């Protein structure tokens, strides 16, 4: 069996998505997600110019060999563009292999470790009260875990909070990056009140999560972790940028609040010290940005040795192809923690028909052979690519900060 042709599909049903389709000489095809938010066309060029020509004629069943061929063979290793491109190939090849086997992907990985996959939804509001209303809506819809993000008095525009209450949150909302202004002190003084209010209104059973989006220094993160201990967060996410893995050692000395990190990681080396030192509790690297199933499985296995569980990234900027494959992985992986879920729009779901379903705060994996997600290429053509950039952040004095 041979790979006969492969091509990228760029579509924007509300936001940009990049999909790779690989077709074999026997007619079976697989698809993979290659979406890197705000940098989509860099991955398209990498695939079209360097990866696809080298795939033609190869045996699609040799997933492991093709992974190393693309990783070692590029000479230039790692990085989000390279690893997203490799991931798309890997995801498409697992899709093909599972279709050939006539099995849903989770069976090839080792079968079900659980019946369903717990997810967390996103509650966002301009202030604490409107955020609480959103939490209530999620609880009514069956969610057992909710990420809470509220506006902070004195900060005009903040990560995770929709422009209008009740609207979905989309950060890549401008042709060129919008500029936001950030104040760590205003945030730190305000945010514990949000968790206090959520516990007071919703009691102890609801899992609450929060994303700091890389904005603190280690000692500030330690203070926040300590102050919110009474509210028993499920996790505190990305409290500092993680290029310096040792920073988490400092935070860890001060707080028992569970720590999650890794949505921008693209390889096991980004997480090695974090995992081996047990400085974190949840690893968020997911299939599209970290080299696909073949590589993320290695990260998850290493994590399992150190009591670190998975908590895959799952914003709307990852396509339903990534989400579908992730649900198979979550259904299998022994050290599963939680799956992020930001519902895609109706048009996105029409472009990417899929067989996973949401029920009572959980995803239920589908039984279709493969990863269970397809693309309607005719419909996809109706939504052309439109450049969209993530914002940048500046401190109140103008210093460029982490967004
Ligand atoms: O926890 C999350 O879901 C993330 O922080 C996202 O919201 C990112 O900001 C987005 O993926 C950037 O493209
Ligand atoms: Mg995040």
Image (cartoon, rainbow, N blue to C red):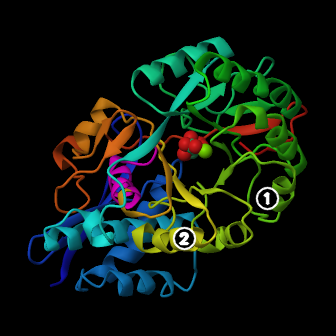
Q: Ligand 2 near label 1 (Cβ, under 8 Å)?
A: no
Task: Residue 274: give x, y in percent of width and height.
Answer: 71, 66
- Left or right? Give the position of 100 relative to 207: left
- Prevailing SS of the magenta stretch: helix
Could you tell me how far apart the alpha carbons at marks 1 and 2 are, in whole angstroms?
18 Å
Question: On screen, 209 above or below 356?
Answer: above
Task: Residue 372: give x, y in percent of width and height.
Answer: 22, 54
Return the residue found at the far left: 26
The first of marks 1 and 2 along the sequence is: 1
**Quadrant, the N terminus:** bottom left
- Left or right? Give the position of 141 relative to 134: left
Residue for badge 2: 299
Do tag 1 and tag 2 residues touch (Cβ < 8 Å)? no
Task: Residue 341: give x, y in percent of width and height.
Answer: 44, 40
Where ligand 2 lies, by image quadrant? top right
Residue displayed at 32% across by 71% down: 110
Residue for badge 1: 248
Question: On screen, 258 above or below 2?
Answer: above
Q: Quadrant of residue 165 in the image?
A: top right
Provide the secondary structure element on which disc 1 rests.
Answer: helix
Q: Which residues are magenta?
A: 317-330
**Quadrant, the C terminus:** top right
Return the residue found at the far front: 204
Residue displayed at 51% across by 50% down: 313
- Foreground residue among 261 and 388: 261
Q: Is residue 382 visible?
A: no
Question: On screen, 31 above or below 150?
Answer: below
Question: On screen, 329 above or below 397?
Answer: below
- Foreground residue among 128 and 49: 128
């Amino acid at each position: 069996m041979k790979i006969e042709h492969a091509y990228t599909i760029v579509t924007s049903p509300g936001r940009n998505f990049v999909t790779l389709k690989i077709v074999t000489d026997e007619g079976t095809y697989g698809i993979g997600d290659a979406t890197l938010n705000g940098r989509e066309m860099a991955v398209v060029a990498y695939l079209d110019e360097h990866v696809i020509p080298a795939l033609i004629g190869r045996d699609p069943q040799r997933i492991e060999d093709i992974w190393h061929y693309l990783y070692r063979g590029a000479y230039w290793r790692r990085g989000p563009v390279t690893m997203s491109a490799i991931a798309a190939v890997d995801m498409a090849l697992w899709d093909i292999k599972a279709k050939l086997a006539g099995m849903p992907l989770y069976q090839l990985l080792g079968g079900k470790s659980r019946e369903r996959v717990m997810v967390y939804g996103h509650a966002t509001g301009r202030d604490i009260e409107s955020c609480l209303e959103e939490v209530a809506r999620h609880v009514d819809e069956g969610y057992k875990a909710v990420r809470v993000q509220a506006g902070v008095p004195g900060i005009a525009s903040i990560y995770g909070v929709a422009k209008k209450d009740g609207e979905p949150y989309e950060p890549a909302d401008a042709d060129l990056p919008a500029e936001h202004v950030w104040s760590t002190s205003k945030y730190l003084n305000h945010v514990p009140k949000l968790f206090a209010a959520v516990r007071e209104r919703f009691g102890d059973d609801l899992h609450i999560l929060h994303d700091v989006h890389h904005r603190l220094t280690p000692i500030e993160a330690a203070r926040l972790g300590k102050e919110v201990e009474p509210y028993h967060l499920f996790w505190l996410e990305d409290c500092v940028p993680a290029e310096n893995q040792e920073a988490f050692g400092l935070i860890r000395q001060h707080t028992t609040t569970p720590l999650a990190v890794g949505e921008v990681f693209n390889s096991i080396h980004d997480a090695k010290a974090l995992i081996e030192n047990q400085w974190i509790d949840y690893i968020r690297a997911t299939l599209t940005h970290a080299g696909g199933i073949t590589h993320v499985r290695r990260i998850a296995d290493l994590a399992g040795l150190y009591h670190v569980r998975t908590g895959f990234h799952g914003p709307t900027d990852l396509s339903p192809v990534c989400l579908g494959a992730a649900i198979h992985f979550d259904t299998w992986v022994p050290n599963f923690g939680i799956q992020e879920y930001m519902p895609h729009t109706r048009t996105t779901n029409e472009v990417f028909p899929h067989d996973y379903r949401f029920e009572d705060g959980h995803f239920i994996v589908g039984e279709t052979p493969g990863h269970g997600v397809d693309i309607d290429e005719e419909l996809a053509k109706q939504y052309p690519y439109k450049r969209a950039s993530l914002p940048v952040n500046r401190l109140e004095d103008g210093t460029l900060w982490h967004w």
